[in-house]
Image (spheres, rainbow, N blue to C red):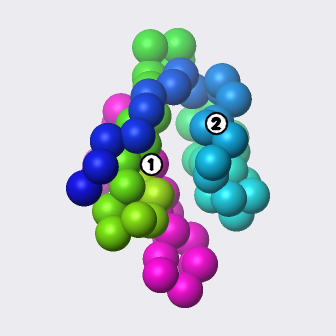
């Protein structure tokens, strides 16, 4: 695993992410827009050269080897 970067909810995502990852991240941010996320951050890591973005609440967006995107919502 390789650490990538961190960024705030609502800020520009790292340019090296695919359009599909950016779209999924934007979808997650839209889902939590009703919450106070002003202190929330995304953490980007790379697992087997594929991006994994985890939000501070535990929601995780992954890109698979086949390019597919999965979103695992935080446990309630």
- Which residue sits furthest bottom? 66
Q: Position of residue 2 (x, y in %)?
A: 29, 49
Q: Is residue 15 above or below residue 64?
A: above
Task: Examine the structure image and report whether residue 69 is included in the region drawn in magenta.
Answer: yes
Q: Position of residue 13 (x, y in %)?
A: 64, 36
How dense is the environment of label 1, judged by Cα within 10 Å: few (below 14), some, or many (20 and up)?
A: many
Q: Nearer the viewer, residue 4 or 8?
A: 4
Give me the residue at 68% from left, 50% from top. Answer: 22
Q: Position of residue 40 (x, y in %)?
A: 44, 23
Q: Position of residue 38 (x, y in %)?
A: 52, 13
Q: How many marks?
A: 2
Q: Quadrant of the N terminus?
A: bottom left
Disc 1 element: strand
The residue stretch that appears in magenta: 53-76
- Label located before the other in sequence (2 or 1): 2
Image quadrant in which you'd find residue 47: bottom left
Tag 2 residue: 13
Give me the residue at 41% from left, 65% from top. Answer: 49
Q: Are marks 2 and 1 in contact (CB under 8 Å)?
A: yes
Visible in this render: residue 35? no
Image quadrant in which you'd find residue 32: top right
Tag 1 residue: 53
How dense is the environment of label 2, judged by Cα within 10 Å: few (below 14), some, or many (20 and up)?
A: some
Task: Examine the structure image and report whether residue 13 is included in the region drawn in magenta.
Answer: no
Disc 2 element: loop
Visible in this render: residue 66? yes
Q: CA distance from mark 2 to mark 1?
A: 10 Å
């Amino acid at each position: 695993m390789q650490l990538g970067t961190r960024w705030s909810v609502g800020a520009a995502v790292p340019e090296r992410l695919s359009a599909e990852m950016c779209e999924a991240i934007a979808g997650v941010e839209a889902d939590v827009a009703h919450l106070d996320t002003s202190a929330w951050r995304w953490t980007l890591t790379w697992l087997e050269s594929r991006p994994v973005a985890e939000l501070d609440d535990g929601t995780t967006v992954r890109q698979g080897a086949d390019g597919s995107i999965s979103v695992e919502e935080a446990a309630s």
